[in-house]
Amino acid sequence: MASLKTLFLHPPSFEGFDGGAGSRYQARREIRSFWYPTWLAQPAALVPGSRLVDAPPDDLTLDDVVPLASAYELAVLHTSTPSFPSDVKVAEAMKARNPDLRIGFVGAHVAVHPVESLAASPAIDFVARNEFDFTIQEVAEGRPLRDVLGLSFREDGRIRHAPDRPILEDMDALPYVIDVYRRDLTIEHYFIGYLLHPYVSLYTGRGCRSKCTFCLWPQTVGGQRYRTRSVEHVLDEMARARGCFPQVKEFFFDDDTFTDDLPRAEAIARGLGKLGVTWSCNAKANVPRETLRVMRENGLRLLLVGYESGSQTILNNIKKGVRVDGARRFTRDAHDLGIKIHGTFIVGLPGETRQTIEDTIAYACEIDPTTIQVSIAAPYPGTALFRQARENGWLAGNGLLDADGVQKSELSYPHLPDTEIFAAVERFYRRFYFRPRKMTVMAAEMLRDWQTMKRRLREGREFFSFLARRRAG
Ligand code: SF4
């Protein structure tokens, strides 16, 4: 079937904004970082002749993307809560350039707020709710909007909603994203500080079995079950990826929790071992040593682990489903086996106090992941955390980001104001990285390899200027 000429766009917003269709928590990071726009690449792979433009990694501005409006019949823009006002401006500028362009928004923000999103601007013709791959494919095929499941749209001046689209169960029906990456992206533009460069990331499944109250995707677009592609489907795409991108040093599986299905994780690992690729993935801090061993022996280099807090009370409050002692044991096992860990922590979750912040910093130093990321708790609309914060009067009205796209604390508690939560992030980083032992390890790593030295020096400069900007902001 012929398709409308379709543009998939992650619009420009804040400079260096890591908020595209692959970023769970949209913000400008401490160092230049970009996730792949995988959630846009999937529908792009379903629409023949389409093009995917990811503005921030390519340093494209509004002036660069608006002229594209004239060349297309349909534009699908990925948006997020913090970038929505700016994304609306991009849509309005494109509509002004080409009034016949049909414009739709996708992403968790519009899935949670379809009516408010459409009401925000007449430039938005439709929004797709929840999973949107086949929804967009049908729009691109030219079907009447009212016949497309999962769509909210404007008709005769009113906002209307088509019935929900059933959740996708046959995950092998999703196309490979690799061909879209090769066609439309410059993979050297994608950096993540703790991954080798260049890297490529993709998904082998969607959803997460855990119920963490702050976590956006499982509560919106992904679902709270782990729906997976078959092992064969994943390995076939990986073989193709290796052929398409011989320069890639590391592949990253960006599933919410790749280790949610241990036998499958081990089966994929064994296949990757045969392919001879270096890879990394997201994991929960509860993977048994035997699974870690199988993964490590088959090319696993690094795990991205959400520890969140060193306080068991906070882990219980957010329904993390992990024991602090279990996380300690897991980390020891990973260290023993030579697996690197990028540990992520959050300050300002419900139950946080000055003391729990200190405890979490001490805990991070004790378990000693290779690198860390410290984020401020972000109550995204659509999450249980957002509802809890609203009911308890914890929303400060600050918004999630400042004018530069840097995280602010939207949560503020009577015993722990937003300003203290904000200040704790820098203290956490300094106490973790400025330990003699950590600095020695990092210096040794740089001295071993000139490329690593150059990269770490650049990232160090970016990191310090990020902290300075935060303080000034
Ligand atoms: S385990 Fe990770 S991905 Fe799953 S709900 Fe919790 S934070 Fe989200």
Image: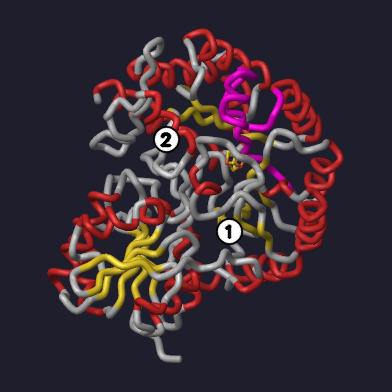
Judging depth in this view, the residue of 33 and 396 nearest the camera is 396
The question of residue 317 being in magenta is answered with yes
The question of residue 198 being in magenta is answered with no
Amino acid under label 1?
Leu
Compared with residue 434, is residue 145 higher up or lower down, i.e. above or below?
A: below
Q: Look at the image and tell me in which quarter the N terminus lies.
A: bottom left
Compared with residue 169, is residue 410 higher up or lower down, i.e. above or below?
A: above
Q: Which residues are magenta?
A: 300-323
Q: Which residue is mark 2?
A: 386
Per the image, label 1 sits on a secondary structure element best described as strand
Compared with residue 425, is residue 220 higher up or lower down, i.e. above or below?
A: below
Residue drawn 26% across the image and 60% down it: 118
* Left or right relative to 159: residue 42: right
Q: Which residue is mark 1?
A: 202
Choose the circle earlier in sequence order: 1 or 2.
1
Could you say which quadrant of the image residue 301 lies in? Answer: top right
Residue at the limit of the structure toward the bottom, as seen here: 1
Residue drawn 19% across the image and 56% down it: 89
Q: Look at the image and tell me in which quarter the C terminus lies.
A: top left
